[in-house]
Structure formats: structure tokens, C-alpha cells
Image: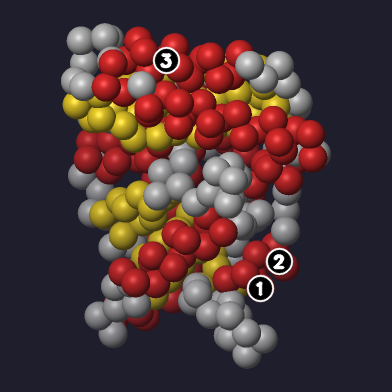
Amino acid sequence: MTEHDPAPHVEPTIAGIRRRVADARTRRARVGLVPTMGALHEGHLALVRRARELADLVVVSIFVNPLQFGPAEDLDRYPRTFDADLSALAGLADVVFAPEVGEMYPNGPTQTRITGGEAAASFEGASRPGHFDGMLTVVAKLLNIVRPDVALFGQKDAQQVFLVRQMVADLDLPVSIEAVPTVREHDGLALSSRNRYLDPPARRAALTLSAALRDAAAAASRGAAAVLAAGRARVDAEPAVKLDYLAVVDPRTFRSVDDTHRGAATVLIAARVGTTRLIDNASIVIG
């Protein structure tokens, strides 16, 4: 990108973004949507670059959705870097849909919610009650507002990707969902908007998450129990990291597997490093 790259058009209203998409449709344009809450980093930009490959009109939404934050979570603290986000999107996105809360929820928080059922109650759903209901509700609204051909999500949020795909299939929504591989720092730390909260000692300790996943993957030939033992041993060796959960799930159901499982699996990890909660995951093959 250079200083001459065109800045994306900012559209703050639902009616406005619908007009832009409708105009693109008259030209038979294919529409791609990247939903975000802003504070963009290279992981988000990888989604936008992939959208650029798949679509003629690339829409990035920037909306800090209050429905997916619990009462004790960091809604007010969540970083808002709109000007920097626009600069990062120059030359990549065509339109930024950036509504205010009142535009998305004109009558206050919506009373109609989408729930992800059993799969939304475990792991992140257990640690953050109501989070996935809020996420699915706003994603459904965004898909209905923009009507994209393809929507892109990061594989770092594996449970979110699973639930969005489940919602799209269950509700027969006419959109393709594409997951883009996790983008990592040179030392393996998964990119996250919350990484900016880590001071240098916490940043070093945070590498325990990706190291635990590597150790877990190395044990995959010995079964799920060995995978979990290897990951936990790595976390236990770092006192600055407080494990929330470490699990092995079947990617088709997002249910935990037992030691008889063979084939594709996903290792999930969530932990606190100081006051910052981080998540990560890795795809493995057991057996």
C-alpha cells in the first residue's frame, strides 16, 4: 500500500450500504463481506485480501457489538482505532460499513436473538455466557443487510466459525462462509486485538499458548489423552498463564472427543495472561 491508495468509502447507515450493494449488483458484481469490530491487525487484513480475490465489491464492517460483551467484560476498554483502520484498508476494501449502535439497534438491544444451541454453550460459550448469542445475532443482521456472496472469518476463532456455518446451514442463508488460516507473529503468537494489552513479560508468557498447541500436535499419534497431557504440561510450566480450558474436539460437531477418536480434530486453548484473556487453536490428525 502507498499514500496514493484510495481510501474506502465509509457508509454509516443500513440504507446507504444497501444502496451501494444494489448498485454493484446491477453490474453483476460479486460481493464479499468481512465482519470486524475494528482495531484491525494483519489477521483482519488477511481476510480482506482473501475477499479481494473472491469478490468485486469488498465490504468491511466495523462495529463494536455490545450484545456479545458480558457485564464484566471489556466493552468500554475494547480498542477503537477507526482512523488507523481506514488507513490499513486503503487499497484493499471498497466500502467500510461503520454504523453507530443506534443504527443497528434503534430500539435498544434487540429482543430477538439467535442462539447456537449446544455448540454455543461450551468452551467460549461457557466462559462467556451470552457471547455467542450476541455474535450470531449481529452476524445474521450483517448478512441480511449486506447480502454478500461470501463472508470471511478467521480460523483463530474456531468456535465462532463453526457456529456461523451452522447458522447459515440451519437457516438456509444464501452465503458462502470461508475461514482464513490464523495469522501469527514470527514467534508463533496468534494475532489478536487484545495482544496490545500485553506488557513485555506477559507477551513472552503468552507464547505458552502456541507452544502448548505445538506440543499437543506432536502427541497426536498417541491419542487424545496424550494430546491433552502434552498441552497441559506446557501450560503448567508457565506460572504466569492461567488455563481456562484445553480441549480436543471433533471439527464436525465441536464436541469433545475421547481417547477412541481417530482422524481430524481441533485442539482448543484459552488462558489468561495477566488480565488479558487469549484463545488459540490448531488442527491435528489423531492416530
Query: Which numbered mark, 2 or 3, is in the foreground of this view?
Result: 3
* Inter-mark Cα distance, 1 to 2: 5 Å
Residue 23 or residue 77, whichever sits in front: 77
Marks 1/2 in contact by CB < 8 Å: the verdict is yes
Quadrant of the snapshot with the C terminus: top left
Q: Earlier in the sequence, mark 1 or mark 3?
A: 1
Q: Which mark is residue 87?
A: 1
Q: Quadrant of residue 199?
A: top right
Question: What amino acid is labelled 1 in the image?
Answer: Ser
**Residue linked to disc 2:** 84
Question: What amino acid is labelled 2 in the image?
Answer: Ala
* Inter-mark Cα distance, 2 to 3: 40 Å
- For label 2, the SS is helix
Q: How is the image coloured?
A: secondary structure
Q: Quadrant of residue 176?
A: bottom left
Query: What residue is drawn where x is 44% and y is 12%?
Result: 229
86 up-or-down from 132: above or below: below
Question: What amino acid is labelled 3 in the image?
Answer: Leu
Query: Which numbered mark, 1 or 3, is in the foreground of this view?
Result: 3
- For label 3, the SS is helix
- Image position, residue 96 (x, y; %): 55, 68
Residue 66 or residue 43, whichever sits in front: 43
**Residue linked to disc 3:** 228
Residue 186 in view in this figure = yes
Quadrant of the snapshot with the N terminus: bottom right
* Inter-mark Cα distance, 1 to 3: 42 Å
Describe residue 259's horizontal placement relative to residue 49 as left or right: left
Residue 13 in view in this figure = no
Q: Residues within 10 Å of mark 2 (few under 14, many from 20)?
A: few
